[in-house]
Structures are given as C-alpha cells and as structure tokens.
Amino acid sequence: MYGILRHPFRRAVVAAGDALRAPMSLSGTADAVMDALASAPGPGAPGAPRAVPNLELQLHHTHLPKLDAAGVIAYDADEQTVVDVDEAAVVRLSGVSETLAAECADALSD
C-alpha cells in the first residue's frame, strides 16, 4: 500500500479519485492530477503543478499501470483511458495518504 502512495503523482491520482469518472482520457486524468497537486501541495509535491514536464507520459508509462496492477483503477494503455475506478480502494488509500501527509508534516515541523 505504501508503495502505491510513494510517488506524489500516484497520491494525486488517489486524491483526484472523486474527479476521475471512467472512462476518462489520459489528458483528462492528467488535468485531474494537476488540479489535485495544486490543491494539496505537501511533502514530496513536485512544486508548481502546471510546470510538470511530460506528466501524461509519466502517468501512461509508470503511474497508471502501477495503480492498475494494484487494483485501484483499470487503465487501458492501448486506448490511453482510465476505464474503471475502484471507489472503495480510492477511499481506503485516501485515508492512508492523508495520515501519511499529516505524519510527514509533523515530523518536518519537529
């Protein structure tokens, strides 16, 4: 579970869970990720989200396939489309992600 949340882009996909409506194109998913990054920057966030180079490429080749393998989403790489979102998994991971973010913030403030 922590491996899934290790990267800020995967955390942003989870955070964008409510905005992800399957089917959703890769560009639509990237937009939702950018919005999630902009609204919840924190430890490990890549900075100004509109300046993320090749976000769609990174999502397509790395992050969406990892989330697919974990059963969080179903990603059709050939069609470059998120075809399903496991809402229960997103809710579960969102809770873990929020806990981790709070713990990191506490650790950094000490």
Image (tube, rainbow, N blue to C red):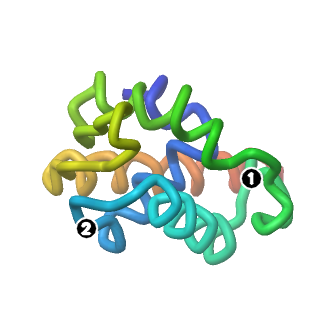
Q: In front: 100, or 47?
A: 47
Q: Is residue 102 left or right of residue 51?
A: left
Q: Which residue is mark 2?
A: 21
Earlier in the chain: of badge 2 and badge 1, it is: 2
Image vertical order of residue 33 relative to residue 43, above or below: below
Image vertical order of residue 46 relative to residue 76, above or below: below
Amino acid type of the residue that numbered disc 2 sits on in the rendered structure = Arg
Nearest to the eye among marks 2 and 1: give it.
Answer: 2
Q: Is residue 77 left or right of residue 104?
A: left
Q: Which residue is mark 1?
A: 45
Residue at the image position 61 percent from the left and 36 percent from the top: 7
Residue at the image position 42 percent from the left and 65 percent from the top: 16
Q: Is residue 100 left or right of residue 49?
A: left
Q: In front: 43, or 34?
A: 34
Q: Position of residue 32 (x, y in %)?
A: 50, 68
Image vertical order of residue 77 relative to residue 13, above or below: above
Residue at the image position 25 percent from the left and 67 percent from the top: 21
- All told, the count of numbered labels is 2
Badge 2, how many Cα within 10 Å: few under 14, some, many 20+?
A: some
Q: Position of residue 81 (x, y in %)?
A: 34, 48
